[in-house]
Image: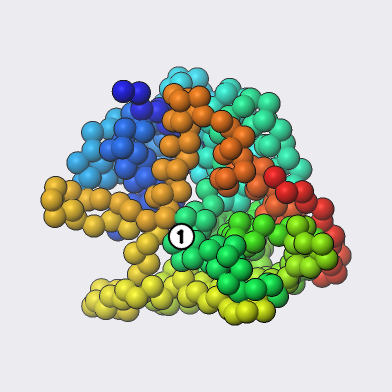
Amino acid sequence: MTAGLKILVVGGGMYVTGRGTETSGTLVPALLEGVKHGLVSEVAIVTTQAGSALEACRKSASIARQMGVDCSFAAFPKEGEGTNAYLQAAKAFQPDAVLVSVPDHLHASVSIPLIEKGLHCLVVKPMAPSLEEARAMVASAEKNQVVAQVEFHKRYDESNLLLYDAVQSRKLGDLLYAVIEYSQQKRIPRDVFRSWVAKTSVFQYLGVHYVDLLYFVTGFLPRRVTAWGQKSHLYNLGIDTWDAMQVVIEWEDFQSSTKAGMVSTHITNWIDPDETSSISDQKINLVGTLGRFQSDQKHRGVQTVTDSQGVKDVNPYFSSSWLDPQTGKIKFHGYGIQSVLQFLRDVHWVKYHNGNLEELITSRPSFQSGLISTAVIDAAHQSLLIHQSSPVEIHCEKN
């Protein structure tokens, strides 16, 4: 029987262990499910301060107890240690792989030095804010021959896999256009990410999900991007980022003799009222010559009404937990969990079973495929900031 992997988590925020006492995050629950599957043996968490690292490990240990999972958690930095704690942690802990969950603008500067140490790497989306940084990440991953992926979990959502099937089987015919709306509550940029949100944009942080998803389900390549944006509410709070962005992407079917493709319109905002029934509202409408595919990814058929929280629309398919009646312990499931587990399986396959890295590059959300969505982000910001919302041409190649 092969050993489990030693995993270093860089970051200790909401996506790692949740925020407050009512949520558990996604990365730690996924790693603990990995322990149950024999994929993970030990976990370390590194943040910028010893206190926050200890708190993240304390909460992780609590989640482990609720799941009935035996797993140790090491905290970095130690009291009194200086900067570059993630490099010190990698040296001391000697992990097999790293999960990088830090602010967008730090993805390249954190992940590349770790990859240079030969560590397999999963980075939360977006891959990077700029194409230059993303290319540097790809070059490092290819040089060091590691599994390097972006945590684009929407590729694992079963409703999106139905979309993939509808497109690939040509049930929709020739694709014409897509309209995608994605909004999130004001409290996310105002409270949760306030310290760094001015260094990202709502399209970069949220909209990138559906850029990658359209590339995944169609195989089309983006050729031209035009963007518009509005600053008002958040700017008046002293947060210099866009309330909303609208991005139009012109796609090309490079396999078609006519190069015909489609147009997608991405409408994103960060100013939904905090009182809405879900943290996010997401809708997809993809239209072809033979039909359309519509998906409401907020209203998943589960709603709770309580005195304490009012009406809440629940997504039970992303990163949810329930009490297993057979064990009496908490169990996590969902496409957010599966996204991380798939990375762990891939690393385990490469490390212990001589798995082929080239197969993973084309079949997973690899760094190479992440170049596509990063090119669109880069072009959207150029269109908005430099070219006064004029179209920006981009040139991408299929993996």
Give coordinates of residue 145: x percent, y percent: 62, 27
Q: Looking at the picture, which amino acid does disc 1 mark?
A: Asp
Q: Is residue 311 above or below residue 152?
A: below
Q: State the SS at label 1.
A: loop
Residue at image location 28% in from the left, 38% down from the top: 36
Residue 89 visible to the viewer: no
Residue 289 visible to the viewer: yes
Residue at image location 78% in from the left, 51% down from the top: 396
Task: Residue under label 1, please give it.
Answer: 157
Q: Quadrant of the C terminus?
A: top right
> Between 295 and 23, which is closer to the camera in this rendering?
295
Q: How many marks?
A: 1
Please state if 99 lies on the left or on the right of 226 as rendered: left
Give coordinates of residue 188: x percent, y percent: 50, 63
Q: Is residue 386 above or below residue 29?
A: below
Q: Quadrant of the N terminus?
A: top left
Residue at image location 23% in from the left, 78% down from the top: 307
Q: Quadrant of residue 46?
A: top left
